[in-house]
């Protein structure tokens, strides 16, 4: 049996797929440990061997960052400081656990850097397909700038003799999506498309299942866990769009910030946290920020989407949804009851959107999810796959 160390950032959407893969490996008799922020990892992974890593004290993004300002923040104020803070903890985890393989999330750069410096085989956990999108193609100065950030991190924490892009393991990259969603994008040859990996999640709070009206479409509205301070206007407009269609539509709205005041009535149910996976099988549509996890989980249930990307990888994921025919994009900053309502009318009324979502669902199921990812990691750990295209 092999020993796998998962290195993850303090981000729910990046930890959840790793939890599913780790559980699969553990069920097959392998030993698994974690390097990350203990609180959030413990909450999501349950009873697990967790090696604490520090994180910068303030990872709160200033509101309203878009475009190049958001990209600059991502590297200078998030990824680079996070790598520096986590690297000593990852080293301590390696010394204590002695892994055969490090599984490093693409945004937990310390995992890949420590692995290459210590000569430990590592695989990349790519929880978003944005890095495969060539979104920066045609912007050579931006690509050069990111290259300098990578070079600086490697000089500080990795092996300066290496030359590959350490965001991608040279041996194994696990992509938690499929080409049915990404399209024909260029990926490293060592990439394995495994589809979404879903772990069992405890229901966050009792849910009033009797509230749902089986005679109407039910829509889930969620902006994820990292956008609490930005979503007030958009959530209110979503609620208004649903009420305009109350004879045939009702909505469950995840409102962790309480911006809607805890409204609950026959048309709108708001909750700080919702049992998203449990709800999705009964949803007619999902309105979201195009976060990769929410999109993947929705499509795994064959549910079409209205996507309103805010920042980071979300515009890329939104474009993939639209290109796949599985949803409609609206502008987050300008979304109002009219545009959101029109998008809902389309995805609820035109069967082509659900048919496209179901096509992606079938590709996800065929890819194998957590079981497939675990099989690739097993082969990698035993040397069957290491260094092969």
Image: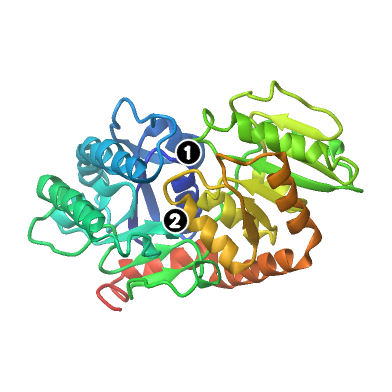
Residue 374 x %, y %: 45, 63
Residue 112 x %, y %: 25, 54
366 above or below 342?
below
- The residue shown at (85%, 40%) is 212
Residue picked out by circle 2: 128
How many other residues sit within 10 Å of disc 1, few (<14), some (14-19) or many (≥20)? few
Residue 248 x %, y %: 88, 47
Label 1 near label 2: C-beta < 8 Å?
no
Foreground pick, 248 / 56:
248
Nearer the observer: mark 2 or 1; the answer is: 2
Foreground pick, 131 / 367:
131
Foreground pick, 330 / 128:
330
Image quadrant assignment for residue 61: top left
- The residue shown at (91%, 43%) is 247
354 above or below 79?
below
Residue picked out by circle 1: 47
Mark earlier in primary sequence (2, 1): 1
Left or right of residue 268: residue 273: left
Which residue appears farthest toward the top when viewing the image?
261
């Amino acid at each position: 049996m092999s020993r796998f160390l998962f290195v993850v950032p303090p981000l729910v959407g990046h930890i959840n797929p790793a939890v599913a893969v780790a559980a699969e490996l553990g069920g097959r008799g392998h030993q698994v440990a974690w390097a990350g922020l203990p609180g959030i990892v413990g909450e999501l992974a349950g009873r697990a061997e967790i090696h604490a890593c520090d994180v910068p004290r303030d990872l709160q993004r200033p509101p309203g960052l878009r475009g190049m300002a958001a990209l600059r923040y991502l590297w200078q104020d998030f990824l680079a400081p996070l790598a520096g803070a986590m690297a000593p903890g990852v080293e301590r985890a390696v010394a204590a656990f002695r892994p055969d393989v490090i599984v490093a999330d693409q945004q937990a750069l310390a995992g890949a850097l420590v692995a290459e410096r210590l000569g430990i085989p590592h695989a990349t956990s790519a929880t978003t397909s944005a890095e495969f999108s060539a979104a920066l193609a045609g912007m050579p100065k931006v690509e050069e700038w990111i290259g300098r950030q990578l070079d600086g991190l490697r000089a500080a924490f990795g092996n300066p003799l290496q030359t590959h892009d350490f965001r991608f393991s040279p041996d194994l990259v696990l992509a938690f999506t499929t080409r049915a969603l990404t399209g024909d994008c260029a990926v490293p040859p060592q990439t394995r498309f495994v589809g979404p990996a879903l772990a069992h999640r405890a229901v966050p709070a009792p849910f009033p299942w009797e509230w749902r009206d089986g005679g109407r479409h039910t829509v889930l509205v969620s902006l994820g866990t990292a956008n609490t301070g930005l979503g007030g206007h958009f959530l209110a407009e979503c609620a208004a769009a649903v009420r305009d269609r109350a004879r045939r539509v009702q909505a469950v709205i995840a409102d962790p910030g309480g911006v809607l005041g805890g409204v609950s009535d026959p048309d709108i149910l708001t909750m700080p946290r919702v049992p998203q996976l449990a709800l999705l099988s009964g949803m007619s549509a999902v309105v979201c920020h195009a976060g990769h996890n929410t999109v993947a989980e929705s499509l795994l249930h064959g549910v079409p989407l209205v996507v309103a990307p805010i920042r980071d990888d979300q515009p890329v994921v939104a474009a993939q949804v639209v290109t796949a025919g599985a949803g409609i994009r609206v502008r987050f900053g300008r979304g109002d009851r009219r545009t959101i309502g029109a998008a809902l009318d389309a995805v609820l009324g035109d069967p082509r959107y659900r048919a496209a979502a179901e096509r992606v669902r079938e590709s996800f199921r065929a890819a194998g999810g957590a079981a497939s990812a675990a099989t690739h990691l097993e082969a990698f750990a035993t040397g069957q796959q290491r260094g092969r295209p």
